[in-house]
Image (spheres, helix red, strand yellow):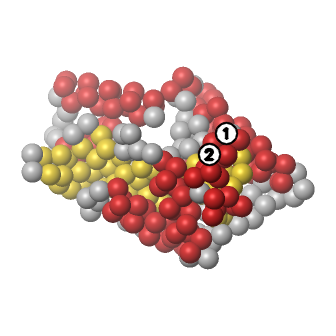
Amino acid sequence: MLPADLHAAEGQAQQALLAALTAEPKGRWTVDWRFQGLRLLPVVLRLAAFLRDQGLAPKLLFPDAGACALAKRDGPDLADCMADFRGHRLVQSEGPTAGLLVAVAPGQPDYSDFEQVCGQHLGSVVVVNGALEDAAVGIGSVARERRRGFLSQWQAAYSLLPLDGSALRRAFPGEWELYRQDPDGYRLVESFKQKPDAEEQALAFAGGEPLGIGANLKMVDSLIEGLRR
């Protein structure tokens, strides 16, 4: 079921992530909230506090020292469990780390640093609103290698992705759910075992009928937009 608001979305994400970490304690998980204008840091701090209350002792990792300093200012009670990628790699130089890492919004420029961090970590890693793929290399050999390697390790614990006239949601251990926006609200169209691509979404909306030119053009637009995220 789609959440009614951000508060409900946070609750869904917290429970889904807890279930994922319980099912696979050393897994690689993602949490995605893609609301336009979302202030991510307060949401992340509440997620970290929830995980701490569950006895999981998360360590929050930020791409740079500036973002880490801002987080420590806004979340002083969690400041002792925050670091940036460089600082954490210095810790790892003395040996692999364990426990739960929560990486906040790593982007494509952080790919190498983040891959190194994960390679030296023996416990679970959660990425919140990551953007590790780059549209500029989205169809090249570099992108294919990354998708077959590092990026293939990740599973969605929770995703809530508003789209053009629709929405995608996944809450572990459930399936991916595709919703259509109707005048009176969102309605479930179809569920999928794997995240549906643009073509699968278009076919679901078409009820399995062959796609027309308009639907194919919309599918291409959705694919391009996905690469930009």
> Residue sitting at 51 percent across and 62 percent down?
47
Labels 1 & 2 near each other (Cβ < 8 A): yes
Task: Return the residue at label 1.
Answer: 66
Q: Look at the numbered disc 2 and give the secondary structure of its residue.
A: helix
Could you tell me if residue 33 is visible in this image?
Answer: yes
Could you say which is closer to the camera, residue 197 or residue 65?
65
Task: Return the residue at label 2.
Answer: 70
Quadrant position of the N terminus in the picture? bottom left
Rendered location of residue 217, percent (x, y): 26, 24
Q: Is residue 189 left or right of residue 171?
A: left
Rendered location of residue 200, percent (x, y): 30, 43
Q: Amino acid at mark 2?
A: Leu
CA–CA distance in space, label 1 to label 2: 6 Å
Quadrant position of the C terminus in the picture? top left
For label 2, count other residues whose C-alpha is less than 10 Å away and answer few (under 14), some (14-19) or many (20+). few
Q: Which mark is residue 84?
A: none
Could you say which is closer to the camera, residue 45 or residue 86?
45
Number of numbered markers? 2
Could you tell me if residue 176 is visible in this image?
Answer: no
Q: Amino acid at mark 1?
A: Gly
> Residue sitting at 17 percent across and 28 percent down?
212
Q: Is residue 67 above or below residue 224?
A: below
> Residue sitting at 26 percent across and 28 percent down?
218
Rendered location of residue 207, percent (x, y): 16, 46
* Residue 70: quadrant of the picture: top right
For label 1, count other residues whose C-alpha is less than 10 Å away and answer few (under 14), some (14-19) or many (20+). few
Q: Is residue 222 left or right of residue 32?
A: left
> Residue sitting at 17 percent across and 41 percent down?
206
Q: Look at the numbered disc 1 and give the secondary structure of its residue.
A: helix
Rendered location of residue 105, percent (x, y): 56, 44
Q: Of all residues shown, which one is farthest toward the right?
A: 94
Q: Is residue 38 above or below residue 51?
A: above
